[in-house]
Amino acid sequence: MLILMTNNTFTKVREVFKNGAPGEKVLLRGWVHRKMEVKNRVFLVLRDSTGTIQCVVHKDSVPESVWSKAKAITRESSFIVEGVVKPDKRAPGGLEITVSNIEIVGISSIFPIFGRESVEYLLDNRHLWIRSRKLTAVFKVKHTVLDACREFFLKRGWWEVTPPIITMSACEGGATLFELNYFGEKAYLSQSAQLYLEVLIYSLEKVWAITPSFRAEKSRTRRHLSEYTHLEAEASWYNMEDMMRVTEDLIHHVVKRVLEERLEELEFLGRKTELLEDLKPPFPRITYDEAIDVLRRQGLPIDWGEDLGADEERKLTENFDTPFFITLFPKKIKAFYMKLCPSNPELVLGFDMLAPEGYGEIIGGSQREDDYDNLLARIIEAGLNPEEYKWYLDLRKYGSVPHSGFGLGVERLVMWITGLDHIRDATPFPRFRERAYP
Ligand code: NSS
């Protein structure tokens, strides 16, 4: 039985294309990606985690039992194939497998996805659509993005920490909080690990974490999930400009690694890579005031003090071929923890990084308010209960330190790097308002 072979007797599809010699005997296992029958031949495209390869069964050169299995096997069945590597100009990649034996491991019922289905239908069948080459390519890019982020912080001496998901106080305002019952007490799913990271910088100085963040977003948009992967970093002694430099170096590093390792996937996704290749810090910086002027000149009426929405951000990205920063926002549109600008207390030392090509915000960060009285005033002003933030305020009482941090939406970054038009495909199991798949 082929199925009883040990793991290392199997070859991966990628290895066949890399090292496969004509005439070499190989054993492969995977799923039937496509099946085609032409007279006395059956073509089975085998898919494994590394790629796809065409396997050809010739009626005349295999035993009857093998031929009948080749006839019976269905698309998406799992199977094992024994055969010989054969160069073939017509085969994708220039190689195919001439099959000598087949074993069906798990026969597939009629696979309910044929192509051309609606987005809604594919989401309803997310558990099956997830096998598509498109989503596989995106998740491989995401893997490299996460790996590159980890490498970035590790090499620069930042500590990775594990903040909680169950929280007792809001970080980003009450409107998007998911409430839960915590042993009879009101608690929330975390919107951001920031406040906890701020606690940790008094001992570890430079910390970072990747945690899921939850936002009960009121509307379904192409860039909002209710649960997303949040990479956050926080450091004592860093001012806003120091932290902006960290973020641009991080993005540069991540994009470089993806270009080095995932070109094949980007190509499969149809991503043009010129802008990614040209990316180089420092990224341009404009202030909120300048952004408002630019938008007005571009014919988008917006009043000073209004928040920049998706439309405004998209318009602004038309002016840049690279990620860029917007800094110094009016305090009334930003969170309570941002430090007031010393030269104009109507503004805060906050920054957003926007991705070009219409993508918009991928990072939000700021220098934090480190003065006890100012922070208390901001908490009250924001309508929050100072009691709930006692521990957070305490940090400004016991050895306060200037510090800054940021949060990066990993799916937003992946969406831009892979050129997706919707965030849902940057995560395997998307969660939206009122619906989770699956
Ligand atoms: O709300 S943020 O702008 N900022 C924070 O949460 C800070 N407390 C982070 C920090 O300084 N430690 O969110 C940060 C990023 C934002 O730029 C987006 O890229 C992403 O998180 N984000 C989202 N991604 C996907 N879906 C949703 N709903 C979402 N909300 C924010």
Image (cartoon, rainbow, N blue to C red):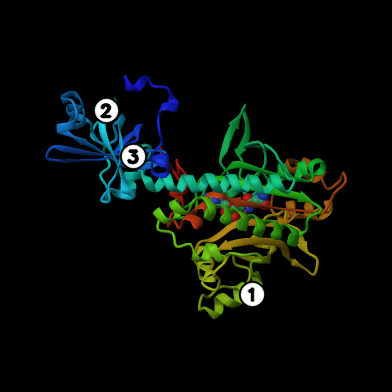
Residue placed most toward the observer, 363 or 186: 363
In this rendering, the answer to whether 190 lies above or below 92 is above
Report helix, strand or loop for mark 2. strand
- Residue 102: image tag: 2
- The relative height of residue 66 versus residue 310 in the rendered view (above or below) is above
Q: Which label number is shown at residue 125?
A: 3
Residue 216 can be seen in this image: no
Name the amino acid type tagged 1: Glu
Identify the image quadrant of residue 336.
Answer: bottom right
For disc 1, the neighbor class at 10 Å (few under 14, some 14 to 19, many from 20) is few
Which numbered disc, 3 or 1, marks the residue that appears first in the sequence? 3
The residue at label 2 has a CB less than 8 Å from ligand 1:
no
Quarter of the figure with the C terminus: top left
Residue 42 is situated, as x and y percent measured from the top left of the image, at: 19, 37
Q: Secondary structure at mark 1?
A: helix
In percent of the image, x 72 and y 63: which residue is there? 348
**Between residues 44 and 324, which one lies in front from this camera angle?**
44
**Which disc, if any, is residue 171?**
none
Q: Quadrant of residue 296?
A: bottom right
Where residue 409 appears, as percent x and y from the top left, is: 57, 51
Q: Residue at x 26, y 28 (%)?
A: 102
Alpha-carbon neighbours of circle 2 within 10 Å: few (<14), some, or many (≥20)?
many
> Mark 3 or 2 closer to N-term?
2
The alpha-carbon separation of the residues under discs 1 and 2 comes to 66 Å
- The correct choice, above or below, for 362 with respect to 326 in the image is above
Amino acid type of the residue tagged 3 in the rendering: Asn
Image check: 138 left or right of 60? right
Taking the spot 78% from the left edge, 40% from the top edge, the residue there is 391
